[in-house]
Image (cartoon, rainbow, N blue to C red):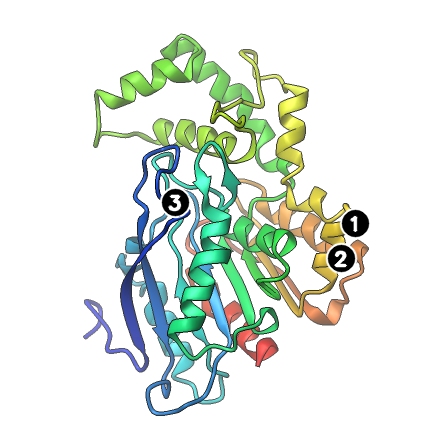
Amino acid sequence: MLPWSAELNGRLEQLTFTSELLRGNPLGDPHERPVLVYLPPGYDESEDRYPSIYVTMGYTGHVGMWFNRTPFRQPYPELLDAMFADESVPRAVVVFVDSWTKYGGSQCLDSPGTGQYQSYLCDEIVPWIDSTYRTVADRDHRAVTGKSSGGYTAMVTPLLRPDVFGALATHAGDALFDVCYRPEFPERARTLRDKYDGSYEKYFEVLATRTGRTTNEDLHLLEMYGYASAYSAEPDGTVLLPFDDLGSIVPDVWARWLSRDPVEMVKEPQYADALRSLRAVWIDAGKQDEYYLDLGATAFHRAAQQAGLPDERMHFELFEGTHGGIEYRYPMAVRWLAEQLS
């Protein structure tokens, strides 16, 4: 009973998937990954096939965290289940996917710095779900969602793999890199200079001596290195930072980051074509987002309009709120997607 637990109307399966694509990844992270699959009320009693909606997590997130219980809030799976308990809501299979790395995340991209996380999602997890559950196994009945870095995944995966996903929902996803990332570079450069001889190698040596005692400063440094591992790693896995010791832009590396900025991507013909092909696009963010991802959401919405995606296929909203505590909005987007994909 609440607040300790809730009896579900549907069913949540906790599974483990063995990935051949992640086996031997550059960071030595596990290639066996947890996967949560939510089956809506009525699934076991019917022979119907359902749209599928994939959920990816923000930076530092992993699948086990979906069960975290905080005061006066229910975990996302319970909110989702309560939403599907309404018989007027079209049913969908919801899949919670893990793309965690030792740096805190992968942006769910294929990178020689982290591993083949996008291919893992698109070429392993999706076919496995389609063969295991009664889904409608085509891109027009499949969506990807997420918040923050998970929202970034939701934006770029359908652009890079429109054969797999035909809809998306992004909550405060990483976008407009000049605004959300670039202001942090001088601060990270200063921290590295003052405490770690200007070197991430020195930082990782120190970090290894205090495992389990990470600070907010550590999270910021790890996050920046994780982004660089996803956006600007060399073929041999060497990670290139987009800023120098003064916090100034390194132009050729920064250009590689911008090539994966959703706002910049949809200016390219192939990605604009992919975006126009989508059945449904949900974009939202809090107006007080600390990382200015409300501005990124607005920029992505404008870019989608300029690319020619009709307004009737989009939901765009800025609401009162910060970057945290917006979990209550996740089921809203899932409901809207389920309606569009049914």
> To which quarter of the image does residue 130 belong?
bottom left
Residue that mark 3 sits on = 22
Image quadrant assignment for residue 46: bottom left
What residue would you read off at disc 1? Answer: 269
Where in the figure is residue 51, as x and y percent of width and height?
51, 76
x and y percentages locating residue 264 in the rendered image: 71, 42
Residue shown at the point (41%, 55%) measured from the top left: 325
Q: Give the amino acid at mark 2.
A: Asp
When asked about the image quadrant of residue 308, the answer is bottom right
Say left or right for 134 vs 319: left
Tag nearer the camera, 2 or 3: 3
Q: Is mark 2 on a helix, strand or loop?
A: helix
Is residue 243 positioned above or below 146 on the image?
Answer: above
Which amino acid type is shown beneath numbered disc 1? Pro
Which of discs 1 and 3 lies nearer the camera? The answer is 3
**Label 2 close to label 3 by CB (< 8 Å):** no
* Callout 2 crowding tier (Cα within 10 Å): few <14, some 14–19, many ≥20: some
- The crowd level at tag 3 (other Cα within 10 Å; few <14, some 14-19, many 20+) is many
Q: Where does the image place residue 238, in percent across and percent down from the top left? A: 48, 23
Q: Is residue 103 visible?
A: yes
Give the structural element (helix, strand or loop) at label 1.
Answer: helix
- Up the image or down, 178 lies above or below 306; here it is above
Residue assigned mark 2: 273
Picture residue at 47% right of the left edge, 77% below the top: 135
Q: Within 10 angstroms of label 1, few (less than 14), some, or many (20 or more) residues?
A: few
Of the image marks 1 and 3, the number of the one nearer the N terminus: 3
Q: Residue at x 37, y 12 (%)?
A: 196
